[in-house]
Image (cartoon, grey):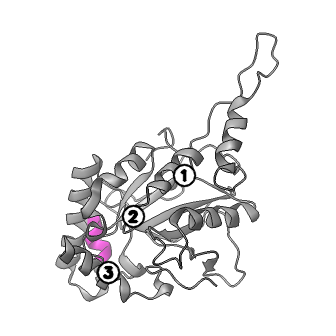
Amino acid sequence: MKKTLALWAALTAVALFATGCTAAADADSPAASGPGTPKAGPATSSAGAAAPDSAAEQRAAAYRKWGLKPLAEPPAPPAKKPVTRAAGGQVPVVSDIPTKDKVVFITIDDGAEKDPEFIAMMKDLKIPVTMFLTDAAIRADYGYFKPLVEQGHGVANHTLTHPNLRTLSQDAQRREICGQQDKLTAEYGKRPRLFRPPYGNWNEGTRAAAKSCGADAIVLWRESMQIQNMQYQRGDRKLHPGDIILAHFRGPSELKGRTMTQMTANMLRHIQEQGFTVARLEDYL
């Protein structure tokens, strides 16, 4: 176990924050249930008047617990997903989703930090996230992520050992991707559809390997969440509809004393301040 943790620490230490794999200094179907799935409207009496909306009050209280105001409910998922892989076609590579909806998508990588407060936060807020998990980071405690899966959050593939895939042969890339597909399926009961290459590094060999392992898309990102602020790829330094946001399972040792929940709260404030809410990535991709 100590060797595994030491290996993971060595792997993450060499990454640059621009690749989205270290904490930097602060600068499946539309009908599926889960966080972010729009709920039915308020109940009405036989006379047609709305019944007292205690659910809204409870939701506001849940957000206040974490120092937040409720985000808007996301729109209903599109009847047809904007991004799909044609039968036999290449795996699409996406950094954002083409949509006019004022929504963004939260993705969280690796799995090194396992803060129980984050599980509680996600249960309270019911904000959908997609977890791109690396076996070297999660194998010490696969069970940590099971409550998050039960809450409806997506599980996706981030390789077995977090290598720079560009340095590997296609066969070696296939072992990294397919091996993690098998492990995640065994642990969480469903084969992932989405794949993210470590550091965002990929080539056509990656694309072919991902396809052979059953991935429907390679998912990159437009923004990465640091400690308090976001790092933007576009010059206007703003969120756009359909943007995919990258965050990491990180703790105080990498967040300058701040916690995973504090980082997440900061991210949600940035999203809300720019007039966006959070939708479920698997509903659009």
Q: Nearer the viewer, residue 18 or 77?
A: 18
Q: At x 46% / y 58%, what residue is drawn?
A: 130
Picture disc at residue 132: 2
Dominant SS of magenta comes to helix
* In the image, residue 42 above or below residue 271: above
Q: Which residue is mark 1?
A: 121
- Is 34 located above or below residue 96 in the figure? above
Q: Which of the marked residues, 2 or 1, is nearer the chain's N terminus?
A: 1
What residue lies at 57% left-to-right and 68% top-to-bottom?
Answer: 263
Is the C-beta separation of discs 2 and 1 under 8 Å? no
Task: Tell me the number on the disc at residue 9.
Answer: 3
Q: Nearer the viewer, mark 2 or mark 1?
A: 1
Question: Circles 3 and 1: CB distance less than 8 Å?
Answer: no
Query: Measured from the top left, where is residue 210 in percent x and y?
Result: 29, 68
Residues in magenta, as a range: 206-211
Q: 87 or 151: nearer the eye?
A: 151
Out of 90 and 138, give the one closest to the viewer: 138
Query: Residue 128: x, y in percent?
Result: 53, 51
